[in-house]
Each structure stands twice: as C-alpha cells, then as structure tokens.
Amino acid sequence: MKQTVFKETHEKLGAKMVEFAGYCMPVQYEGVTAEHLHVRSKVGVFDVSHMGEFTVKGPKALDLLQYITSNDVAALYPGKVQYSCFPNGKGGIVDDLLVYNLAENDYLLVVNAANIDKDWAWVSKQNEKFGAEIANISDSISQLAVQGPLALKAMQKLTDTPVTDMEYYTTKTLTFAGVPNVIFSTTGYTGSGGCEIYFKNEDAFKIWDAVFEAGKEFDIKPIGLGARDTLRLEMGFCLYGHEIDDTICPIEAGLGWITKLNAKDCIDKEYMLKLKADGLKRKLVGFEMIDRGIPRLEYEVCDAEGNNIGIVRSGTFGPSINKSVGTAWVKAEYAKVDTEIYIKIRGKLLKAITVKMPFYKGN
C-alpha cells in the first residue's frame, strides 16, 4: 500500500486506517457522524494527499485540454478552476477532474487517486498529437482540504493574501505559513465552504502544524474519509466508481453542465450529440428512502411490481438531513422528480422517491 506523508500523524491521533485507492488512509477518528457534523458547523481537515496532480503547460496546453476534457477550458482565466471529465472514446468516462488555470498557458489537473496511472497514460497518449509540456507531479505534492464554515477565517491567519472573500472555484498562488508558492483554492467537496492547500511534501509537517495551530480557537479537528463520503453524497457530488465510471456518459450522469459540445471539438463529441438527439435510455437520479433502510452500492432498484429498473450507485444515512438517501442509475422513464421507486434491501422492496439533488440545502 502507498501512504501519504501524514500516515504516522493519523495513527498517533488514533485514526482507524484502511486501504483506499491503493493508499493507507484514515477513515475516521472519533466517528463518521460526529466528524460529518463538525465539518458542517465548524472546521475540519482532510488529508487528501493521495490525489493526483499533473501540470500542462506551453502554447499547446489549451489545445490538448480542449480535446481531452468535456468542459470549455477556453472559458478559464488565470485564477479560475473548472470541474470536468475525460471522455474515454467509448461513451464512458476515464475520470473526473479539476482543471486549474494558474497562469497563461499554465494548468494544473487534479485527478482521483485510484486513477492516477490510468489518467497519466491517457493524457500522455492523447498528447502525442499536440506536444504540450506535461508532467506527473503526484508523488511530490501533498494536499489538505480544510472544510467548514470557519475554515477560511482560520486559514486567513496564515497568509497576508486575502482569502476569506474568495469565490467558489477560484485559486491563488501565495505564501502560506511562511511557505512560498502554495496553491490555495476553494473548490470544496463537502458543501460547507473551505479551501484546498497544495504544497511540496517537504513542507507538509510545517503546514499541518500551522493549520491546526491557526484553527485551535475554532475547534479544528482532523476528519476521515468516511465523513468525506457522507458530506459529498449529501451534496449529490459524483464519486468515480460510483455515480460515474468508464461505462456511463457524462450526460447520462447529469453532467451536461460540464459538457460543452457546442464550444469545441472533443473526444466523444459525436457520440454525445447523437445520444442527446436520440434520447437517453438511463439517467442518474437522487432518491430519499420512504421506508426504513439504508441503500448501498449495487443494490437493485425496482418498480412496484419488482421489475428491475436500475442500480444504486451510492447510499448512506445523511447526518445533516436525518434521512437515508442515495443515487441510482435508472431507466429514463423513472428519472422524473417525485417518482416512486423501490430499493431491494435484504430481499425486501423498500419504497423510495426520486428527488432533486443536493439533498442537503445548507444555510
């Protein structure tokens, strides 16, 4: 198993460690529900150093990124971040990712930990046609996600650059805790505000200590990946291998908003245009349980007669909303909001209803 630079730190703090995406990671410290609610109300720190980072630079950078991603990279400007995905040329998704425009012709791609090698091979292969300057810097970069309504207030203590008023999906390169050239962004995966901090591995412990010292007055706590999953699911955010994978098209997954087919040519453009014209056969939906039960990945979704109409892609009990919720791929005719569906749990058909996401509406 791989490990982040903070592995021993997590263990000393009493974290329960598990294998996640090939890394030894903290799943919880004091408990998923307590950690979840702490992020919603105060501030929590996630070690997300397992994520992958690629740089794409030079005069051919934009041409490459326009071709291999679904969103319109030309709409970015220095300091702006974009959510996107890599269409795989077969009607599915290689991965979802963030595209950071750090400066002119200077981009950072942030990809999922489990897909680093696959994504790097994909980007490298496609770049043979373009010749952009690309590098995989994943092994040299660590990342902390500081999340919650008090996060930016706490982190402002560590930099002279204003960060408390940063808009959602923006980034700045700044001096943080005395460390220069730190990438600081506000993309968030919890729905409760906050930031992400990218830095070199050699600066990891200095930044960790500074973050927790700065957050002490705000009751800052380390948070595990268990709560990261419940927080993101309450927001209806996709997780690769669940809501999206190499078999589902971005449009089927409700990601039409990051699929800018009129703006450019990209991989799978013709396939997706035809899919839209012909009509979707399946869609991703959010649902709330009416009957008591917690849905889980790959549970069967049925109609009232017990006929299979889809499959659960994520499910949990949402601590902020006090409901069991989930996502599912279902036949398109069952995707309309307020449609009754049934989740097969331990052989029983339990009633649920499709709802508009996010499940958690925030303040």
Image: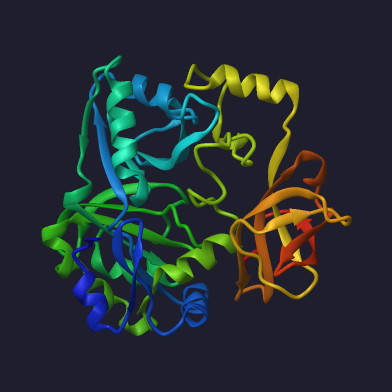
Left or right, residue 30 beside residue 136:
right
Nearer to the camera, 132 or 41: 132
The number of discs equals: 0
What x and y, as percent, mark residue 73? 43, 29
What x and y, as percent, mark residue 20? 36, 61
What x and y, as percent, mark residue 17? 32, 74
Q: Quadrant of the C terminus?
A: bottom right
Nearer to the camera, 305 or 181: 305
Left or right, residue 266 beside residue 77:
right
Nearer to the camera, 258 or 27: 27
In the image, residue 100 above or below residue 346: above
Q: Quadrant of the N terminus?
A: bottom left
- Would you say residue 261 is visible in this rendering? yes
Q: Quadrant of residue 91?
A: top right
Q: Residue furthest front?
A: 347
Left or right, residue 358 beside residue 221:
right
At 45% from the left and 57% from the top, the residue drawn is: 188
At 50% from the left and 52% from the top, the residue drawn is: 239
In the image, residue 76 above or below residue 128: below
At 57% from the left and 35% from the top, the residue drawn is: 250
Q: Residue furthest left?
A: 202
- Would you say residue 102 is visible in this rendering? no
Q: Residue furthest right?
A: 305
At 74% from the left and 63% from the top, the residue drawn is: 344
Q: Quadrant of residue 216?
A: bottom left
In the image, residue 293 above or below residue 194: below
What x and y, as percent, mark residue 143? 28, 58
